[in-house]
Image (spheres, rainbow, N blue to C red):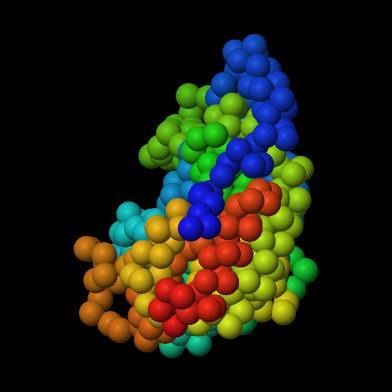
Amino acid sequence: MYNIPVPFVDLDASHAPIIGEIHECIARVVASNNYIKSYEVQRFEENFAGYIGTAHSIGCANGTDALELALEVLELKASDEVIVPVHSWVSTASSVVRTGAKIVFADTLYDEFTIDPKSIEERISPATKAIIVVHLYGNPCRMDEIMALAQKHGIAVIEDCAQAHGAMYKGKKVGSFGLMSCFSFYPTKNLGALGDGGMVLSDNAELIDKIRALAHCGQSSKNVIKYIGRNSRLDALQAAILNVKLPYLDRWNASRRTLADEYRSMLQGSGIELPVEEKDSVHVYHLYVVKAPRREDFIHYLEEQQVGFGIHYPFLLNEVEGMKDGRIYAKANSYKEQIVSMPMYAFMKNNELEGLKKLSSNIINHKYGLV
């Protein structure tokens, strides 16, 4: 049997060409003996804000903390509501729970997996204080419609960009539309550290200054405790590594988009539904998520062929304990039992691509009874 193992993700493919630069920056940080709130962190904050197109930024420990800190500075009350997509990673919603505010879920778009502006509009009430939009899988939300709704009702928009580093909507980077945006630099992200890391960006200096203090044990300056804060800081080692990687991000994203084009060519006519990219969007394919009508059979076939896969995510957020609302979200429910994440990473090896082409050919030829 023609059987070439294809990993779900291969970090070495992007690390190998720059490993010397990574080792050099690690050695520089170690030699500096300056590991927390250092020049390396400040430089990455400035560089990444410049890349996204915002005026200010603050690094923190991870993407979940970024969301929680962004919500905290809004000073939400228990009676306030935050609209969140029902299909995302749990941190999008748990960050609201931790503020004490009320989650209100909105449905998602069947073809794009992102929050449905019409569902947002249906869920807005006088208590709505914020909307968290998630550029899920690297696919930009429909930001013009969402921002118009937010401005009409005086609602803050927070962009969850954990999977969308470098994605664009109508010529602007995602993360530059809302009042604040939140990023994760988990190792497998399009721009990933060698550990955890996160960031909040905004054009509002006052909000970023408050988040900076909250994330540094509540200190507005050394030993001046202005808030009840937390310890959530991006360390110098991760910042230095991210500074090395940032200039390569667009190249890596272009490679992911090329692989997405290959998938479209390979799987056309297979019976597997492919992700849709809006004409005004630049999807960066953190994940390449398809819909397989017979998912268990499809997964079994992938396992037979030693092709990696994932399911992102096998549940809706309103099914999570402590977040259940008893509602049915028709679009998200219609695809949650079908989604499968295919291998996706920059610079896939030629033999791995050939393995995927053979796999796709077998699906199209009905050899495994999948369609």
208 vs 107: above or below:
above
> How far across and down, in percent of the image, does residue 194 sit?
54, 34
> How far across and down, in percent of the image, does residue 322 sit?
22, 63
Horizontal arrangement in the rendering, residue 14 relative to residue 95 (left or right): right
Q: Which quarter of the image is occupied by the C terminus?
A: bottom left
Quadrant for residue 25, please give it: top right
Q: Residue at x 74, y 73 (%)?
A: 170
Tally of numbered tags:
0
Quadrant for residue 46, please give it: top right
Out of 14 and 324, give the one closest to the viewer: 14
> How far across and down, in percent of the image, does residue 22 sit?
67, 28
Out of 129 and 134, give the one closest to the viewer: 134
266 vs 327: above or below:
above
The reply to whether residue 138 is visible in this rendering is no
> How far across and down, in percent of the image, does residue 107 sit?
42, 80
Horizontal arrangement in the rendering, residue 153 relative to residue 296 (left or right): right
93 vs 14: above or below:
below
Q: Residue at x 63, y 25 (%)?
A: 38
The reply to whether residue 264 is visible in this rendering is yes
Horizontal arrangement in the rendering, residue 69 relative to residue 239 (left or right): left
Out of 18 and 298, give the one closest to the viewer: 298
Q: Residue at x 64, y 11 (%)?
A: 31
Out of 130 and 319, give the one closest to the viewer: 319
Residue furthest out toward the front = 1
341 vs 122: above or below:
above
Quadrant for residue 355, please give it: bottom right
Q: Residue at x 40, y 58 (%)?
A: 304
